[in-house]
Image (tube, rainbow, N blue to C red):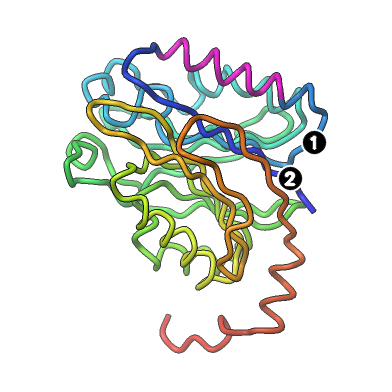
Amino acid sequence: MHQVKIIQLAVNDNETRAERFSRVESYLDRIYAEQSQPVMVMLPEIWGTGFFNFDRYDLECEPQQGETYSRLAPWAEKIGCYILAGSIVESEGSDLFNTALLINPSGSLAGSYRKIHLFGYQSKESNMLTAGSDIYVLKTKYGTWGISICYDLRFPELYRKMVDEGVDVIFVVSAWPLARLEQWELFNRVRALENLSYLVSCNCAGDLKSYTFGGNSMVVDPWGEIIARAGEEEELLSAEIDPNRVTEIRVDFPALNDRRVK
């Protein structure tokens, strides 16, 4: 069994980026003090700037190994775990991306994923940012992991590509609103069930620019059952996942082998 820790961070109007970084480091210090040895610690989507703070994207964008990486990398090494640092507004040349960063237990950048499906409904994301084009899959001693971001959940073909690469645990970082909470739960459960994979999601909490984030980060097993779930407020959620269970279920119920359209 492998433990994951989900920092469901509140992103509010009445706080600064520096205050959120400080709070995140307090959680990481708490995780270190627990000596529980998680394999993964997760943060949500664009938590540093705040997803709906589009007026700050140009000001607070950063390279992949910028402030967010530099602040969190020492903690990954200290705790001895991977940190999925949520996502950042990444700058490369004249382009901005919504980019998830994965830091390995030695404090190095294991890889990154640029959000492929950018959100346009009541959002400036699709106008301001450049879409990514490649999925991200990492084989680790704990299993084969895939990373996605928020709106990606609505596009099942992305996850089929991950499964074709051997993924058994899907990680999702998000800034999903409370107004569409039922859809959030549905997509979390269906993406896990249809791919016979674990799905681990980390969503924002809090209120930003007249939007309320939904919280309800969760861990879903390969049968689509929720085995751990946060509430609507900021909290630290812990859960255990067992990649061997994925193998057992896929052997016992080989639905993925019966696919006829790829």
The amino acid type of the residue labelled 2 equals: Gln
Q: Is residue 206 left or right of residue 137?
A: left
Q: Give the mark, 1 or 2, whose residue is nearer the N terminus.
A: 2
**Is the C terminus in the top left, top right, bottom left or bottom right quadrant?**
bottom left
Q: What element carries label 2?
A: strand
Q: What residue is disc 2 on?
A: 3
Identify the residue at horizontal 47%, vertical 64% (top origin).
159
Q: Position of residue 139 (x, y in %)?
A: 67, 54
Q: Which mark is residue 37?
A: 1
**With respect to residue 194, does 128 lie above or below?**
above
**With respect to residue 1, does 260 lie above or below?**
below
**CB atoms at circles 1 and 2 under 8 Å apart?**
yes
Q: Give the range drawn in magenta.
A: 17-30
Q: Which of 6 and 254 is in front in this view?
A: 6
Identify the residue at horizontal 41%, vertical 61% (top origin).
187
Q: What element carries label 1?
A: loop
How far, Cα to Cα, is label 1 from label 2? 7 Å
